Image (cartoon, rainbow, N blue to C red):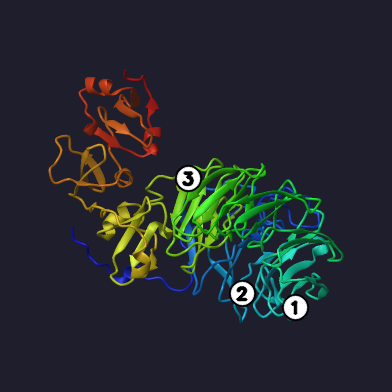
């Protein structure tokens, strides 16, 4: 096959752009508006990992399969989870200290330079009017969430160690170096500074009654009153903490302590259970509504632990897992891995979805109000991942943004199907795949090498001969596929997703099949289910006579009597 190199101008992109459009809607929360802290489960994503409890639980259903809705590319790692305002605006922070506000379709609305690196995450105030970020110079900054104008900058506290958390009285809590827990008033002025016995780790957590909970590197979990004084109790951990504390809907506290996941009672310092997995845990847990705990570990596994502390299941990925998972309203779990893949699981541990980025996916996963996943990668991109259950004509592949990748070095264009890239030979073929209006991701050869290679897509120019997995052979004419009953020795096999994108003129006597296992005979304008292989044979048909069609074509026929 001629692997022509398409001109660069055919695919040129400029600036920070997003691909395709998906609307975002907002919904209500499961907490009262006057509860004093952000809700445990909410559709708008105001706090770090969804709420002030950081449980990773979201009140919407996530995707059952994954493809890119859009992506944005920066110049540094995107390791921080996003925040999402009720109007759909998305806020993302890269480690080089660039804060971006994006529309629900990924269009850049405004940016701001912090002037220093940040390992925190953007957080919105309870009303969604301000976006807050801490930086490596020890300052917390506030921007007008609508237009990005600066509102205030706090005093310098040395170094902000993680994201801020909104607590009771709208106090803004964060951990700073030199053993400090700090609370700011809503206007950015200081409320209180608590001196700790040791530095804290990560991000403070706030309970439903406003109690502030932190983990410190001397191996303690400590609770403080809503105004920071006094400390109400502390729990000694089996080892120094390796994650922030999170709070489940049952009120229990959960924290990683080196190789153990630890559950602590909600109203006392008692440890409920400890689960050792024999390898360090740097993935903050997510807690389901049933109390199950999900997290990743350095052995590359994703773990599910029951509410009683017993292993439910584990799954091996290809690299250490430091990403923090998200749980949707159905109990499905989504998490990234150092092997560059985002994994989706049912509550029972069955994989339901994967997506491969170009580098490690270490950020926490966020589920947006529209069910999209938002996740950053070390490939300097923020991805919006949506469900991929639509037919191939409108969703030609399952993974990369716009479903296309262009090799920056050669100009060759690939479409990604089932996690593998296939070369597209010409623009006509691309257009007939339903992808001609999409712009590709420009990838370096090193990035491209991380995507497995599959057989090239055959040309779909008129006159081409292609065959499907059923053995059916087609000739392309005027952009349609015409069955060739006698077959053809020179037919090139094409993926079924490709076959289904080309319209088939379905006349009486044709045998067709959609995405399920049923085969139908078209007769008198009706579709008749052929119930068995022997029934197909009695019609004088073979498996190679079966024509693949989209489900929308099937739905266009009335149902007739079945063929037994």
Q: Secondary structure at mark 1?
A: loop
Task: Between residue 79 and residue 433, name the one nearer to us.
Answer: 79
Question: Which class describes the residues within 10 Å of circle 1: few (<14), some (14-19), or many (20+)?
Answer: some
Residue 89 located left or right of residue 401: right
Picture quadrant where residue 429 is located: bottom left
Which residue is labeled 2 in the image? 118
Residue 351, numbered circle: 3
Which residue is labeled 1 in the image? 154
**Residue 65 seen in render:** no
Disc 2 and disc 1: Cα gap in Å? 15 Å
Residue 401 vertical position relative to residue 543 in the rendered view, above or below: below
Picture quadrant where residue 466 is located: top left
Picture quadrant where residue 292 is located: top right
Name the residue located 64 percent from the left edge and 67 percent from the top edge.
Answer: 122
Image quarter hosting the C terminus: top left
Q: Residue 192 in the image: state x and y as whole percent.
A: 83, 72
Task: Between residue 469 and residue 347, name the one nearer to us.
Answer: 347
For this orientation, the residue located farthest to the right is 230
Marked residue nearer the N-terminal end (2 or 1) = 2
Residue 108 vertical position relative to residue 563 in the rendered view, above or below: below
Q: Residue 355 in the image: state x and y as whole percent.
A: 45, 54
Marks 2, 1: nearer the viewer: 2
**Residue 476 seen in render:** yes
Residue 79 vertical position relative to residue 315 in the rendered view, above or below: below
Circles 2 and 3 in contact, beta carbons < 8 Å: no
């Amino acid at each position: 096959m001629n692997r022509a190199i398409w001109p660069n101008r055919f695919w040129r992109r400029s600036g920070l752009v997003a691909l395709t459009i998906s609307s975002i809607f907002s919904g209500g929360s499961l907490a009262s508006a006057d509860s004093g802290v952000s809700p445990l489960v909410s559709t708008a994503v105001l706090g770090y990992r969804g709420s002030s409890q950081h449980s990773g639980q979201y009140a919407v259903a996530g995707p059952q399969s994954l493809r890119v809705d859009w992506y944005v590319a920066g110049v540094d790692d995107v390791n921080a989870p996003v925040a999402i305002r009720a109007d759909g605006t998305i806020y993302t922070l890269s480690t080089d200290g660039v804060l971006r506000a994006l529309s629900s379709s990924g269009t850049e609305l405004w940016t701001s330079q912090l002037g220093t690196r940040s390992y925190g995450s953007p957080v919105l105030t309870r009303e969604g009017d301000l976006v807050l970020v801490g930086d490596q110079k020890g300052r917390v900054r506030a921007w007008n969430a609508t237009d990005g104008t600066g509102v205030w900058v706090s005093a310098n506290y040395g170094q902000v160690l993680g994201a801020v958390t909104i607590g009771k009285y709208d106090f803004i809590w964060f951990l700073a170096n030199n053993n400090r827990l700090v609370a700011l008033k809503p206007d950015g002025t200081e409320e209180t500074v608590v001196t700790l016995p040791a530095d804290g780790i990560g991000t403070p957590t706030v309970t439903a009654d406003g109690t502030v909970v932190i983990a410190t590197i001397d191996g303690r979990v400590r609770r403080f009153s809503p105004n920071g004084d006094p400390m109400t109790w502390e729990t000694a951990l089996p080892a120094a903490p390796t994650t922030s504390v999170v709070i489940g809907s049952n009120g229990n506290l959960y924290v990683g302590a080196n190789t153990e996941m630890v559950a602590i009672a909600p109203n006392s310092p008692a440890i409920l259970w400890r689960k050792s997995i024999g390898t360090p845990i740097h993935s903050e847990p997510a807690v389901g509504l049933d109390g199950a705990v999900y997290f990743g570990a350095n052995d590359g596994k994703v773990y599910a632990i029951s509410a009683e502390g017993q292993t439910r299941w584990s799954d091996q990925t290809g690299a250490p897992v430091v990403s923090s998972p998200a749980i949707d309203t159905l109990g499905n779990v989504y998490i990234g891995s150092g092997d560059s893949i985002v994994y989706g699981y049912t509550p029972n541990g069955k994989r339901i979805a994967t997506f491969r980025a170009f580098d490690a996916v270490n950020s926490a996963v966020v589920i947006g109000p529209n069910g999209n996943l938002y996740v950053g990668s070390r490939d300097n991109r923020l991805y919006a991942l949506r469900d991929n259950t639509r037919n191939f004509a409108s969703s030609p592949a399952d993974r990369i943004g716009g479903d296309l990748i262009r090799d920056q070095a050669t100009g060759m264009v690939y479409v990604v199907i089932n996690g593998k890239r296939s070369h597209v030979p010409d623009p006509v073929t691309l257009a007939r795949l339903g992808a001609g209006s999409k712009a590709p991701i420009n990838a370096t050869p090193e990035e491209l090498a991380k995507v497995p290679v599959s057989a090239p897509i055959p040309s779909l120019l008129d006159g081409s001969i292609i065959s499907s997995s059923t053995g059916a052979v087609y000739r392309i004419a005027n952009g349609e596929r015409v069955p060739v009953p006698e077959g053809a020795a020179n037919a090139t096999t094409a993926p079924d997703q490709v076959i289904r994108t080309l319209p088939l003129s379905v006349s009486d006597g044709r045998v067709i099949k959609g995405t399920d296992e049923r085969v139908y005979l078209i007769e008198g304008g009706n579709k008749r289910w052929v119930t068995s292989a022997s029934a197909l044979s009695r019609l004088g048909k073979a498996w190679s006579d079966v024509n693949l069609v989209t489900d929308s074509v099937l739905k266009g026929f009335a149902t007739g009597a079945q063929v037994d």
